[in-house]
Image (cartoon, rainbow, N blue to C red):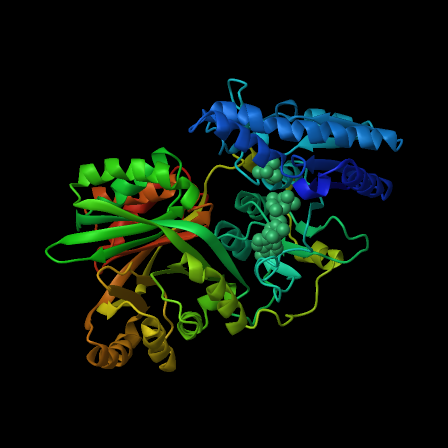
Amino acid sequence: MPLIVQKFGGTSVADAEKIQVAARRAIQAQQQGNQVVVVVSAMGKQTDMLVDLADQLCEDPPAREMDMLLSTGEQVSVALMAIAIHSLGHKAVSLTGGQIGIRTDSSHTKARIQSISTGRMRQLLDDGNIIIAAGFQGIDEAFNITTLGRGGSDTTAVALAAVLEASVCEIYTDVDGVFTTDPRLVSEARKMNQVSHDEMLELASLGAGVMHSRSIEFGKKFNVPIHIRNSAVFNDEMGTIVGPMPESEERSVSGVALIKKEARITIRGVPDQPGTSLSIFLRLSEVNLAVDMIVQNVGAEGQADISFTVLDSDLREALQAVEKAAAELGAQGITHDANVSKVSIVGLGMATQTGVADRMFRALADTDVNIEAITTSQIKVSVLVEQEKAMDALLAVHREFELEKPARARVTYSDLATAEKRTDASTVVDRLQHMEELTIEGVVLDQSQARVTMALVPDQPGIVARIFEAVAAEDVLVDMIVQSMGTDGYANVSFTVPRKSVDQARSVVGKLAAELGGSITHEPEIDILSVFGIGIRSHTGVGTRTFQALLEAGINAEMINTSEIRLNVAVASGKGEAGLAALKEAFRDVLSEVD
Ligand code: ADP
Ligand code: ASP
Ligand code: MG
């Protein structure tokens, strides 16, 4: 019998009436011939209320006790949901994370799932019960209650769908699906009919709070079709399918995401030599913090500044960790800015199309938004802007890419059934032993790129737009872009282009430099090492291992960019082969296929 997982978020179970509505939906799915597992979140704002209570008692509450506390929210809603189903004349059993056997590691408040036992659930389902599973929680080896991080019920739902080989995982929430950007912020945002795993992974990790990004890791790893829809809509209207395919093959950008409260940390005056990035990644990964927008700015006399961003809520912890790294490196000092926001465009199409980033930069310049930093990956461009300009920036970029305009026709369940090629059962079971463990699919070396750097660019709106418009006008495909955080009113912009196009790029950027007063350097050949897979940025160990391996091989990282699916490091030409060998060795135990 087919099995479906339905997840109801906080607003969808906020009161007794809503719980009853959700209960009816589960019963209906069972009556249509499915076995049904329902995953619920805590009611309404319950989790926030519990966090607030703890904060009133303690500035830094112990993580273990926070998990004990927060897990109660879901325990209330599973019991109420089971009671509601019972009162409608159907059989239901509620289970906590521990009772389902959701085993996690012991990193309280951000635990990762290691395994899930299916025996008890299968038995209960075969006996005709609807299972009501508590989202967001698990249990570690010592039977401590753990939680998966805020928003983690999505991850519980998709993980259960994976182990139970559900035909679909339905995520019921308070909007109609995944929109081109947060519909509560931009009224012209459009619901996407479909979005690819990779795009959704990036969007979620770059701020689209509609899904917990780790749930998308499961969706991708185990090929679980995810259908996000509105719990208040009662017709067959499709929401958004997260699957292998993008909404449109032609579009360069699919969505825009905003993280309003970001913080930038800069370590000033560190030696520009192998090992600097490592110390930082190492210290931050010790406290399980994933960094983003890491930018190294080569300064005078072998000294560099390294900047990166973290969530504002992680700032205090990050600063503590970074102080240790700065001391180790003999850095001159640390500065930070908690008044920044990150705006990102995401789309599979941009990997192959020229003239995407410059359009974003131009839209921002025309809205008088200064770009404080830029980083890219194959399928995203992120910029850091001043917090009070964040909304203008989001809107301007959404308009520039005309995301409000519909893409191609919607998909249906039957399309899904044919599009999906499910992994065979034994492979799934095998991989499930590792659940949320890191998946590294490969390590590669790209020897096609050259680097161009324009130093001392005046840090004001419109300059980077002009640089990349000039390059795009030559039809040159730019790969990595890194703009350092502007200090003293000046910034550096480095980017890579195909080796054959480097002279073209240099000459157009050179003209601009002459006009604007910047200076140009370039390397006609640069080697780019990439580690790719799933969960690359959020598994903090990837950065650590990569930089450890490069340090041991005596290789300096010249440019770095990270995303959920890739870590790219540009190194001097001639160092690529040795770097590749070092990385293959470093990831030997986790490489799912060594090429
Ligand atoms: P739930 O409680 O159901 O898990 P969440 O609040 O976690 O719901 O997620 C739904 C919210 O995500 C929406 O109300 C919306 O404001 C926000 N959101 C952010 N980005 C997006 C987006 N790109 N598409 C849809 N919703 C988004
Ligand atoms: N209740 C938890 C939270 O609010 C988990 C979730 O809703 O997904 O973060
Ligand atoms: Mg949520």
Residue appearing at x 81%, y 52% in the figure: 234
User: Is residue 41 something one can see in this rendering?
Assistant: yes
In which quadrant of the rendered image does the N terminus lie?
top right
Q: Specify the quadrant of the image occupied by residue 3.
A: top right
Most foreground residue, 485 or 348: 485
Q: Specify the quadrant of the image occupied by residue 36.
A: top right
Instruction: From this view, report whether residue 549 is shown above or below residue 257.
Output: above
Q: Position of residue 266 (x, y in %)?
A: 27, 49
Q: How many marks?
A: 0
Most foreground residue, 517 or 295: 517
Residue appearing at x 47%, y 67% in the figure: 350
Q: Residue furthest top?
A: 142
Q: Specify the quadrant of the image occupied by residue 354.
A: bottom left
Q: Position of residue 485 (x, y in %)?
A: 29, 58
Q: Residue furthest front?
A: 56
Instruction: From this view, report whether residue 96 is shown above or below residue 450.
Output: above
Q: Position of residue 329 (x, y in %)?
A: 18, 41
Most foreground residue, 333 or 275: 333
Instruction: From this view, report whether residue 133 is shown above or below residue 477.
Output: above
Q: Residue furthest right?
A: 89
User: Is residue 196 something one can see in this rendering?
Assistant: no
Q: Position of residue 304 (x, y in %)?
A: 19, 53
Residue appearing at x 53%, y 57% in the figure: 199
Q: Horizontally, is 459 left or right of 126 in the view? A: left
